[in-house]
Image (spheres, coloured by chain):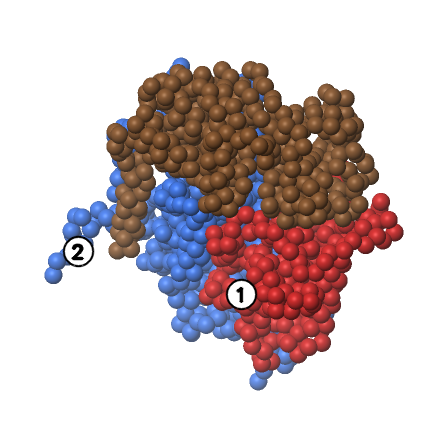
Chain colours: A blue, B brown, C red
Amino acid sequence: MHDRRSSPIIFLLKNRVFYLAVGTLVAILIPLLVQNSYVLDIADDMIIWAILTVGLNVVVGFAGLLDLGYIAFFAIGGYTFGILGSKLGMNMWEAIPIAAILVLVASVIIGIPTLRLKSDYLAIMTLGFGEIIYLSVNNLNSITGGPNGLYDMPSPSIFGLSLQQPSQYYWFLLILLAIAIVAIARLRSSHVGRAWLAVRQDELAARATGVNIVKYKLLAYMVGALWAGVVGVLFAAKQTIVSPTSFQFSQSFYVLSSVIIGGMGSIPGAIAGGFLFILISETLQGMAQNYSSIVFSVALLGVILLRPKGLIPASVGRRGAGLPSNGRTAGALTVRPALATENGVEAEVPTARAAPDERRSADRPARAGYGGGGALLEVHGVSVTFGGVRAVREVSLAVAPQEIVSVIGPNGAGKTTLLNIISGFVRPADGRVELSERDITRLRVDRRAQMGLARTFQTPRLLPTLSVVDNIIQGGHINFTTEAPEVAVGTGRQRREEHAAREEAIELLAMLGLSNVADTIPTQLSYGDQRRCEVARCLALHPKIILLDEPAAGMNAQETAALGDLLFRVRGLGVALLLIDHDMSLVRKVSDRVSAMDRGATVVTGDVETVLHHPEVVRSYLGT
Amino acid sequence: MKRILVFLFLAIAVAASPLFANGQRQKSSNDFLLGIGLPLTGSNATYGVASLDSEKLAVDYVNSHGGILGHQIKVITWDTKADPATGVAGAQNFVSRHVNAVVGFFNSDVTVPAIRVLENANIPLFGDNPSTPKLASLHLKNFIRITGDDALEGVIQAQFAVKKLGAKTAVVLNDQETFGEAFAEAFANEFKKEGGKVLDYEGIDPTANNYSAILSKIKSLNPDLFEFSGFYQPAGLLVKQARQTGIKSTFITDSAVYGDKYLGIAGKAAVGSYMTNLPIGSATKTPLEQYLASNLMSKDNIKVDPIDANAFDAVIAVWHAAQKANSIAPADLIKVMHDISFQGATGEVSFLPDGDRAQVDYSIIEVTPEMKYKTVQTFKEVLTAG
Amino acid sequence: MFLQELINGVVVGASYTLIALGFTLVYGLIRLINFAQISLYTLGAYLALYFTPIFAALIPVQGWLAFVLSIVVSGLLTGIAGVAVAGIAWWPIRRAPIISMLVSSLAILILIESLIEVLISPLPMVVKPPVSDRNFELLGSHISTLQIVMLAGGLLLTLLLYLFIRRSKFGRAIRAVASNPESASVLGVNINTTVFAVFGIAATLAGVSGVLVSNTYGVANFTMGEIVGLKGFTAAVLGGMGNIWGAVVGGFCLGILESMSTFLLPSQWTAVVAFAVLILVLAFRPTGILGTRLVDRA
């Protein structure tokens, strides 16, 4: 049988780099071979549209925000050059940075009230802002020229050569597109991209790993706006006129269609969608009726219903450059001394994580790896009521550093609610929660994560389209100190951080015995493995304490025993544990202390045997 | 496998696309290639399609009279969608196909960038209806236009309002689009120059259907007349709702409103309203005007309006330019285009050095109680170079 | 003077209320903004353009009867279209993330509008109601017959809807599904039928609104739903999304606000006023004036 894999042609066609190379070659050759100015004009439009699509893809595809008013930023860019050019004689090169700043400011102003809303209201709000911008440029005759637009901008020139032909603009547009692709691809394969993915796929998991949801939504919105604004300047210069007709809602709709048809969340998809849009529009050119709208709305509907991932789907499970997951560094682990035993002997922390100073940012309190001193977690008399039922009634609890405390009780006792209060997903009506002697009762979930509080969920919440190792790396989100601009440029510091995080994740996987599944996606793992991955993800955060919500659920005796050993190893790394579970063998094995709850209140807290033999506990929960 | 299919699909799409189709059609050297760029779809479609019909009629007329210096005119059309970017692409397309001349583009904001492309390629533009004064101020050598500019209609209206109607106060409204806004501004300025007072000047939303708010304002200001510049839907609604709320002020509007639809929407409220137009029903019609009128009536059952007539004459102007230059080369046409003169469907046609029409015939018409249009005054306006 | 403004605002507000009802109904049930509704409003108006002359010819003397028949038939047909839209754009992806549903609803909106543009006409159409539109003087202000009909129609429809939701068996089913789909299905309510029915009812409301408004003003064009649709949505949010009386309150408040604003701002900015209201409400009091409710506590 002919081995298809060895056929060189098949190999080429399956390899992404091939497409990239072909695309780049074609892009460079076109203006050299084609002399037809009409074709080049269309090519220019294709590149402009591709930049818009790639930009909107960050907002819609990466961060999952349905933006129906994107073209407003394109308008701001175009009109910045229009106004400054025609009234002050400013040239295009000077207008670009000003347009960039204006567009970023506008995206912050629009974003702050808008991005907190749910998807549907967010969509309408962005639509509203888009219309406001359009109406403003159409009506403010003295500033924007009103419906007539602005014509008198100086023609741009470079090194004395005046830019008037489509072929001349082509190169600048192509360079802009290339920069956009590189910067955005870099963002996507960094902690920023993983944070965006978490925001889009699982807000709860995102917050629990310390991702500031609003900040990252705003960041995506700003990145998208930036590219639209900059290409808006080039668009206005090439057209020599900027008028409101180019910036109506229909344009926002078409860019959105291009993103979705091309492939939401996929950069090559966005480019393909952008190119295809112009090609199809030009093909429909000259038809007596407005068939474009029909064609695109049908195509959009078709894609959503039949192939929601789009023409070129975003790749799943492979994020960013980096070391192969079971590569050279795995060997380094064998040099490590043995990790913790049941006696809680302090283990040596793997060297990859021993230089916390590099990862500490100036405004965050220094956390020297694991652990910390004093009473670690204190809960004082918290209560909360849901719909008339008092779910938690004046519960108090304390966990010392490296202590393992279990909370037990029947269903409905309020255990998970208690966990949610401690982790910040629920606000208590009364009481206090303190972590390392700081009051965190009203603190946001992601800020608690920054302080070293990690948790798992009753149903494991790993991000479904990231590989296991990438999920772990995402868990260490708060330990990254580089911000978006550094990531986009790809400074040495950012690359080192990413590399170190990846190495650390690989070691964590090895420690948990999960190295062989590093590159699989979570949905292909057993529940037990998923739980262990969640624990690994918690460890990536460098926590002081991990809250575990029924970690043994659905496990058999063997797996439960292994879980117990794992928990000891985790404790040995200097982490305290607070767990809820129904499996008494696990509780007996690992707990230093136990707290029993019933109907929202604490029944008794103490050492294992005392609590488990307490008559109330036996009556209400354990039974005969 | 799927990825291969997608790649093939994209490759075929590119190959079959207009990139290689639209751009490469060769023309036979015997034809005079005329590019016509108009908004055939989108918000101005009705005017674009009407212009195209008239322009095609003119082409038929010229072709049946021996063509241009013996060459038959072959038309390539381009739908600008009233969007500047699409218009520019159209101009580029015409250039790449080596047209001899271009007629178009109806919308002022499309014409301005498109004409620069044509200027760079030394191809003449015979403008039909782009009426912004801006175009003349650019002093382009490859441009003439049949329409008077916006300012002119507004000036004439204001003159009529003050001198014939004796109006002293006015409220001026426009639809915040290119034509309406320029027109209203010209009206307001001229009205003030003639000693009138403009009590309020604002734009309205042409897509709205309820103007009660602005009409309340007008009612409280009680002007002698209120003026609106724009198209027929808002004009009809405005006058109808004005009469419903008891506003007695005279209503005056522009030539774009002319037609049956205005009467249909406004109903009886249209009686007594005025608008600018070409002279209608005048006894002496030029031969071309008769030709156009009878053909439009028999083909589409519509009457001639200024937009149709301007479009028609734009093609006729191309014919005369070629005759004067005794050549069909674009560069030669450019040299002579400002010097031609003829009797067109719009009357006496000649041009100023900056491309503007030298003389325009306008009239003011009124809607009679029988719901018909009647000319009440004609103007022969002679323009001077601006 | 002030009374005229009030009347103007209330009349305009009635058209917003009619649209707001449809939005609030669907949102109250399945938390989805049904963009497609905007085009169903337009569809209703165009259907009536076709049916009104037919009925007027069949029943020559009775203009009002012809008018009512036309409204009913157009409304029902639009309702069927609404159910069809639900079948295409909602049912197959009902478990997908909300972005998919929003986008497909948007695609349907553009599709229906473009079909009307291409198949019927891109130009504004004259609408001739089969009844004469007389003007009334009311304390120095003016209002016309059809405006009164639109106003009355809006209030009547709201009342009917309210009674339907509160008193009828099907209304109970709607409320049950709105507050807790799981227990509703346990109790034997067919959730899917309920949702389809609500889409149909909302579509009928939209279609009837389209007929009423286009006849009151005498024009129709294929984009007529867009601005009114967004203002109707604003009215629904302003009054309280999911709250039926909220649609009324929101509609009238928005209409009056717009009327009053022309004294401060030139009227080309009126649309901006509506958007500004939307943005301010969503930013500062997203539950609206009467508070967000599920359909159960209209």
Label 1 neighbourhood size at 10 Å, few (<14), some (14-19), many (20+)? many
Residue at the front extreme, as displayed: B283
What is the chain letter for disc 1?
C
Residue C9 pos. (x, y %): 76, 50
Corner quadrant of residue A163: top left
* Marks 2 and 1 close (CB-CB < 8 Å): no
Q: Residue at x 55, y 51 (%)?
A: C222
The image shows residue A310, relative to residue C264, as above or below, that is below
The foreground one among C98 and A491 is: C98
The image shows residue C279, relative to residue A1, as above or below, that is above
What residue does disc 2 label?
A: A4
Asked if residue A543 can be seen in this view, the reply is no
Horizontal side of B162 relative to C80 (left or right) equals right
Q: Residue at x 15, y 51 (%)?
A: A7
The foreground one among A555 and A34 is: A34
| Label 1 SS | helix
What residue does disc 1 label?
A: C81
Q: Mark 1: which amino acid?
A: Ala
- Tell me the quadrant of the picture where the N terminus of chain B can be found: bottom left
Asked if residue C59 can be seen in this view, the reply is yes
Q: Nearer the viewer, mark 2 or mark 1?
A: 1
What is the chain letter for disc 2?
A
Q: Which mark is residue A396?
A: none
